[in-house]
Amino acid sequence: CGMWNKIRSVFLFQMKQTWTNQRILMIFILIAFFIFSNLQGVLDFSQDVGIPAAPWAFPHITSDFICQLVIMVGAVALFCDAPFESEMQKYILPRAGHTAWAAGQCMYIIALSFLYVLMILLFSILPLLPNLTFQDGWGKILGTLARSGGRSQYGIPFMVYDYLIGSYTPQQATALSFLLSFECCVWLGLLTYFFNYVSGRYVGTFLSAGFVLMDITVANEWLPWFYRISPVTLAQLQALRGKNSLYQVDLSYALWFFGIFIVCLIVGCIIAPKFHGFRRKRK
């Protein structure tokens, strides 16, 4: 119980710091505006044809490789300053201990990732409120956009995937897309934290940024096999069609990839402070 109280205290301290961090608040605002602007064309199309839109754009937005790239760039920016060193750390760390401090920071990364993806989900619905319906599954608007040229006519920048509409119910697609995006954010946050900590520099930040750009690099230069270790690819539900598809991965593989590496990174983040010989002073 004593250790848990210390972990919780570190977590709550870091969460309080979040709401006064202008950089984090600005990232939330910019990403919300990005999602909002992407959906303006869907609302225009819905109003022009006089048919309400269903609130299931989120799986399509997070399956679009450009939108997912922007979302994950935002995630890297959220955690770029890991391991979140501050003046208050020298007062809290001696009381909490290195293990509780690291565990609390891991909890913070998980919680902030959840809030970030939840914000994206909410802002994939809010722009459609003037013309929204919860009936008829995916709805006629998304179905039409997936199978016609209306998307380009109305300047809708993200893809609406007929594959998702045909393979999943909207509730399934939304839940799975949320889970994949959440896991990807956590993966990037923990990766940043771990390598920034053990290097004493921003190695983890640059490494995470490189992984985010891997999806584009593989599409243009590398062999398709590298999609198997591209987190942005594995966070796109439409890409997870099995070994015979372009991406050569399925949903089960993506969930195992994120799950195993997240557990390993959490363990690494917690035990890393015990090896002070690897810790160099941050410049």
Image (cartoon, helix red, strand yellow):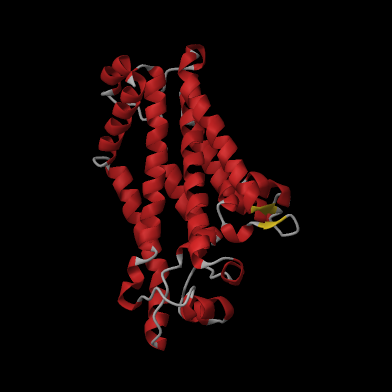
Quarter of the rendering occupied by the N terminus: top left
Location of residue 196 with respect to 228 vertically, above or below: above
Residue drawn at (47%, 14%), measured in percent from left and top? Answer: 274
Location of residue 159 with respect to 105 vertically, above or below: below
- Residue that sits furthest to the bottom in the current view: 49
Residue drawn at (66%, 56%), measured in percent from left and top? Answer: 219
Percent position (x, y) of residue 152?
Answer: 51, 78
Percent position (x, y) of residue 121?
Answer: 40, 59
Judging depth in this view, the residue of 281 and 12 nearest the camera is 12
Location of residue 206 with respect to 270 vertically, above or below: below
Percent position (x, y) of residue 205?
Answer: 48, 36
Location of residue 274 with respect to 30 vertically, above or below: above
- Residue that sits furthest to the right in the current view: 244
Residue drawn at (34%, 78%), measured in percent from left and top? Answer: 131
Judging depth in this view, the residue of 139 and 64 nearest the camera is 139
Side of 242 relative to 184 (left or right)? right
- Residue that sits furthest to the front in the current view: 1
Q: How many marks?
A: 0
Q: Is residue 174 visible?
A: yes
Quarter of the rendering occupied by the C terminus: top left
Residue 54 position by quadrant? bottom left
Q: Is residue 81 visible?
A: no
Residue 134 position by quadrant? bottom left
Judging depth in this view, the residue of 276 and 209 nearest the camera is 276
Percent position (x, y) of residue 267?
Answer: 52, 26
Side of 270 relative to 3 (left or right)? right
